[in-house]
Image (cartoon, grey):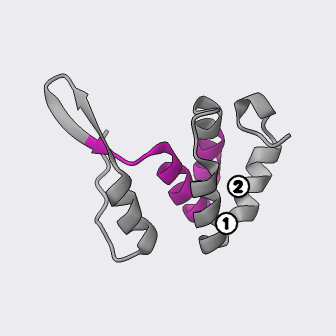
Amino acid sequence: MIEPFCLTKDLHHQERWQRKVQEYVGDEQFWFPTAEDVVIQKLRWGRDKDLEDVAAVISVQAGRLDFSHIEKWCQEHSTINRLEKIRATLPPELGGKA
């Protein structure tokens, strides 16, 4: 499933576009948002499924996420409490806070 999103004037959307990563699937080239930017956007949406996805992304990407980038945007979007609540449910080895 492919879900296209329009580039808007939103500052995070602009930065997310600049940070995208290139991947090849077979011979086809695709661009994807970073895991950090997926977390940030899903925290903004804040639906139950999105918050479950955030916990899953943090767990799968444990030790590889740039939390300073995530926290910067969560402060900007007033979603830092959502992030902290999710991280409090995860063990430290899966990206939770000790």
* For the residues bearing labels 2 and 1, Cβ distance under 8 angstroms: yes
Q: Give 37 or 4, whichever is nearer the viewer.
A: 37
Please identify the quarter of the rendering in which residue 47 is found: bottom right
Q: Residue at x 79, y 34 (%)?
A: 92
Boundaries of the magenta span: 31-55
Q: Residue at horizontal 43%, vertical 73%?
A: 11
Instruction: Please tell me the numbered disc located at residue 79.
Output: 1
Q: Quadrant of the N terminus?
A: top left
53 in the magenta segment? yes
Q: Position of residue 48 (x, y in %)?
A: 64, 53
Report the amino acid beneath label 1: Thr
- The quadrant where residue 12 appears: bottom left
**Dot 1: element:** loop
User: What percent of the width, then of the height, locates residue 90?
Assistant: 78, 37
- Secondary structure category for the residue under label 2: helix
**How far is mark 2 from mark 1, CA to CA?**
7 Å
Q: Which residue is mark 2?
A: 83
Q: For mark 2, does the 10 Å Cα neighbourhood hold few (<14), some (14 to 19), or many (20 or more) residues?
A: many
Q: Is residue 47 left or right of residue 37?
A: right
